[in-house]
Image: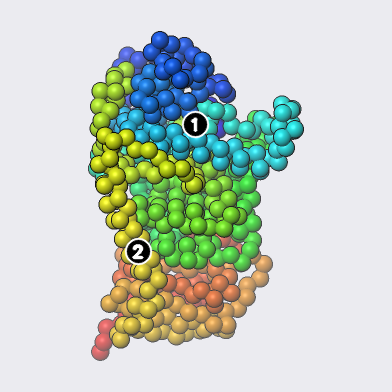
Amino acid sequence: MSTPNGTDEPDQDPQHDVAPEGAYEDAAAPGRSEKGIEPDAADPEESAPALSENPTLAELLTGTARGDQAAFSMFYESTSDVVYGLALLMHADTDSAAASAQAVYQHLWDQAEPRAQDLRLQTQASQTLTDEYAGFEPEADADPAAGDAAWRPNEYELVLEWLVPLAHRIFAERFREGLAEPLPLAPVPQSEGGGVAGLPEEVLEDLLPLSDSQVQSLALTYLAGRSHQQVAQEVGAAVPSVKSRLRDAMTRLHSARLEDESRDRPGEGDPILRAAVTADDIARGTAVNRNFSSEIAADLDKGLLTELAEPYALDAVDDAERALLDEAALTAEASIAQQWDTRVLAARRTLAEIFASHPVAPPSGLLDAVLGSVGHKEVGMGMVETAGFDSEETERQVPKAKRWMLVAGFLGVVLVGILVWLIIIAAGDTRSAVEADEDAYTVEQEMNEEGQLRAVLSEQEDVGFLEFEDVPELEDDATYQMWLLPVDESPISSMGNYTADELEDDGIDISGLAQYQMLQITVEQVRNEETPQGDTVAEVSLQVPEEG
């Protein structure tokens, strides 16, 4: 991740409604180094005595937890251009962007102690993973000429890969709560050229490796703060398809970034990206069913935790789904947990490289506004547990003045727990609900002249499932791809690719039957096709026939 140069004049994007010239204060920011910021970033007489002569950003955040406004101001001056630059990319106007950037720093002031601990935990995890994948040895690490040593992130980069996801999640929550207006983006139908209307020109080149549907899914989730369910509804695709597009889009972006880095710098590139892409490629070649279902809980039951790392890092999940994923990551086997951490970190590094590399100095009065309202709590993200990796933490001390927050937090946890329980129950009872419906409709037919399929559809429950027997094996890398044809003129959507064994072992669950007229099964030579290209081997009507 490149380090934005705070001393450069901020770029003005002609596509954005930016403040007139002179509205911003001087863009010069304190100098940045691997050890921290320069000591002249604030008046030394105003600095807290506990700060070192050349404090790191982590130390400044720790000083903020003690109520040190000078330390907080130094942290703000060193990072606010990146946060505000990201806000300008994501918001409809500069007023909304400034308000959301202010919300980020209000949160950092109010929650400085737990956020400082989160930063320490993620920094340690990031350094450990990077060193492990780069094959660092203590003695080799001391040699500046040692291979991938150049790829160790410096202190500023480590802070950004923690701060940018935190800021993004606050922005997304403010959009969903109606506290801020997101950038107006609109998916363009394929018949009219595809892609997304309204994309900031700063990121257009970075998104070139993606297909039109991947650009739509990624832009609507990351820039406009939509959940993956909202994106599916907006673009007229199945929920599993959107999750697949987000995952595969990040893999393409990782690969493109590795190619760029290999040209610009010696070595093989960021070891975290190499590990994430390699893990993804290995999964594609195994018998692991990488195809998503409509519910996060059902995906976790299928063992797809690591496959959900990218939607998680993009903040494309809601609070209940985030709670499910956090719990699954905390309780996963060590190897799975490491894969999860690696892919989340890789996604956050790549996203920061693309969307947070356009620093803009914030309005001159923003810091004063933050310090003038440090008790304000409604920032759109009242229950942030951590913006980094899930790690075991020591018990945190809460100031007495904030004890009322414990009650609100407890109630929030209870509500999230109830939602999680409901999601798990709903996901696990799909087939039971269908079989319990006395009016469920059953269809049995041949597949590819050899295999057999049985579809059981419940109009009352609006769900159904398919079971398969004797499905013919396919040659080479060909797979069976499932397609849902909507009842209206919405685009066809993919449910994913399956091998013969996967169909026979797991079958297919379908929700929202009323939206679709037919399930089509084709044989595709390439995974994740966006429209049917191969031969059709079966078509199943999903509309229950009327009696009589």
Residue position marked by numbered label 1 in the rendering: 159
Image point 53% across, 36% down: which residue?
123
Q: Could you say where residue 497 lies in the image, as x and y percent from the top left?
A: 53, 65
Q: Quadrant of the N terminus?
A: top right
Q: The residue tagged with tag 2: helix, strand or loop? A: helix
Q: Could you say where residue 510 lies in the image, as x and y percent from the top left?
A: 40, 71
Q: Could you say where residue 8 lies in the image, as x and y percent from the top left?
A: 47, 17
Label placed on residue 421: 2
Query: Is residue 192 in view?
Result: no
Label placed on residue 63: none
What is the C-alpha distance between the residues marked 1 and 2?
35 Å
The answer to which of marks 1 and 2 sits earlier in the sequence is 1
Image point 40% across, 37% down: which residue?
114
Image point 32% across, 25% down: which residue?
18
Image point 48% across, 66% down: which residue?
301
Q: Could you say where residue 82 lies in the image, as x and y percent from the top left?
A: 43, 28
Q: Nearer the viewer, residue 138 or 179?
A: 138
Amino acid on which disc 1 is placed: Val
